[in-house]
Image (cartoon, grey):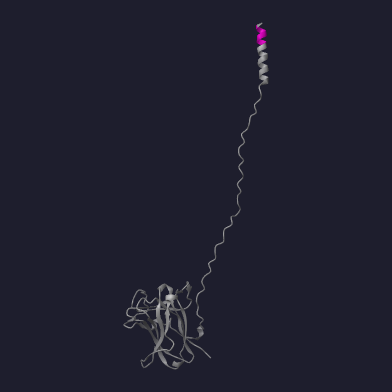
Amino acid sequence: MIKKQALFLLILMLTVACNVPTQEVQTEQLPTVPLAVIPSDTAVPPTPTITPVPPFSPDVDSGNVMYDFTAQYCSAKWGNNGEFFDCPINDLETKSGVVQKLDDAKLEGGIPINAPTLLTIPGYDQLMGIFGRYPAYQVQSGDHFMAHLACLPDGGECHVEFALEYYRQDGTYVSLPFSDIELNSSNGFDLMPVDIDLSSLSDQSVDFVLVVRNIVDEPPGYPVWIYPHITRKTP
């Protein structure tokens, strides 16, 4: 009897084991990571091109230049209405007057000056002005005094008068007609061309004087003569 029961239990256990459902093993799916795209050479924006400001160059026939006032500026005797002073004067803060040659001057708008430039700041204490008396020059037929006059923007407002004057050999002091040119930069910085016919002085020996006078009794700014020279024009 016991054997029959044991056999029955064994058959029952085998039957149950065969009927147990099989569980599927699920594999966890990892998210797909897209492949990174390696860019080729990245485009670099072009560097902006800075166009240089063209310089101011006066139209001068160097072959006809008879006298260069800038090259000879320290041959002149410089002074104001009260005293003479050495050449050059580099102290721009002095009230007595300044004369010096500039090599890198710029006009309004940063325009470089490509020409000999002479800075002549008049003494502004009691309107003293500045005067440069040059050695004697023998004027010939066809001679013209030529220059461009300006006030540099670095010096602030400019209220001055330019003039070309001269001494005769007898000591008489004369101002040439049409040579008194006023520059007033309160409304902008002017560039004034000058062409003075010297034919009235033909065959005379004279001492030319470059003159800048204050219009008001205050700092006069930075007045300059751009390539002041005497040229001989042929018919």
Magenta includes 30? Answer: no
Residue 102 in view (yes/no): no
Magenta segment's dominant SS is: helix
Q: Which of the 4 image quarters holds residue 177? A: bottom left
Say whether residue 26 is left or right of residue 62. right
Q: Which of the 4 image quarters holds residue 163? A: bottom left
User: How far across and down, in percent of the image, does residue 103 sit?
Assistant: 44, 75
Quadrant containing the N terminus is top right
Q: Which of the 4 image quarters holds residue 219? A: bottom left
- Residue 228 or 218: which is nearer the viewer? 218
- Residue 158 or 53: which is nearer the viewer? 158
User: How far across and down, in percent of the image, does residue 63 sit?
Assistant: 51, 85
201 in relation to 12, above or below: below
Hey, which residue is sitting farthest left in the picture?
Answer: 82
29 in relation to 185, above or below: above
Q: Residue at x 40, y 90 (%)?
A: 206
Q: How many numbered discs sit on the rendered protein?
A: 0
Hey, which residue is sitting farthest top in the picture?
Answer: 1
Boundaries of the magenta span: 2-7
Residue 161 in view (yes/no): yes
Q: Residue at x 44, y 75 (%)?
A: 187
Hey, which residue is sitting farthest front in the picture?
Answer: 187
User: How far across and down, in percent of the image, does residue 122 sit?
Assistant: 37, 79
- Residue 138 or 32: which is nearer the viewer? 32
User: How far across and down, in percent of the image, does residue 119 sit?
Assistant: 41, 78
